[in-house]
Image (cartoon, grey):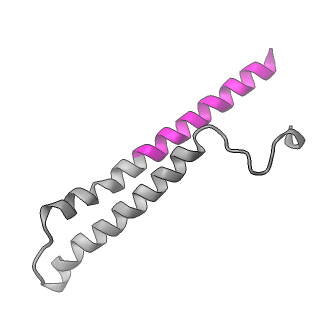
Amino acid sequence: MRDKTQPNSAEPGDRLIRVGGIVFVIGAVATLVTVAPLFLGTTPFPVYMFVLSMLMGVGFLIAGAGVLQSVAAGRRRARDARF
């Protein structure tokens, strides 16, 4: 099986996992930037920064959907190989 798989081949769900990771990192940075004024004693950021902080959860959900898609493709492949 390993000799049939290309080293750079994209599996189903890989793109969703990458995009979810990028969105998660953007949300994590926005969360750090939003929380920093609380510790530094400066004026808080506007509301849109708090909305950007929600991207962390959105990225997690996108990556989770990619993982589920990858698992479903693997199960389909295993079921087809069995018959």
**Residue 31 in the figure: left or right of residue 68:** left
Q: Give the answer, above or below, for where 4 lies relative to 50.
A: above
Over which residues does the magenta segment extend?
61-83
Q: Quadrant of residue 44?
A: bottom left
Q: Give the answer, above or below, for where 54 lies relative to 45.
A: above
Check the image and name the residue furthest to the right: 3
Q: Give the answer, above or below, for where 12 lies relative to 45.
A: above
Q: Residue at x 13, y 84 (%)?
A: 41
Q: Give the answer, above or below, for where 25 lies relative to 77.
A: below
Residue 67 sits inside the magenta stretch: yes
Q: Position of residue 51 (x, y in %)?
A: 21, 56
Q: Nearer the viewer, residue 31 or 11?
A: 11
Q: Position of residue 40 (x, y in %)?
A: 18, 85
Q: Nearer the viewer, residue 17 or 68?
A: 17
Residue 45 sits inside the magenta stretch: no
Q: Residue at x 62, y 37 (%)?
A: 12
**Residue 9 in the figure: left or right of residue 60:** right
- The quadrant of the picture occupied by the C terminus is top right
Magenta span main SS: helix
Q: Residue at x 72, y 27 (%)?
A: 77
Check the image and name the residue furthest to the left: 43
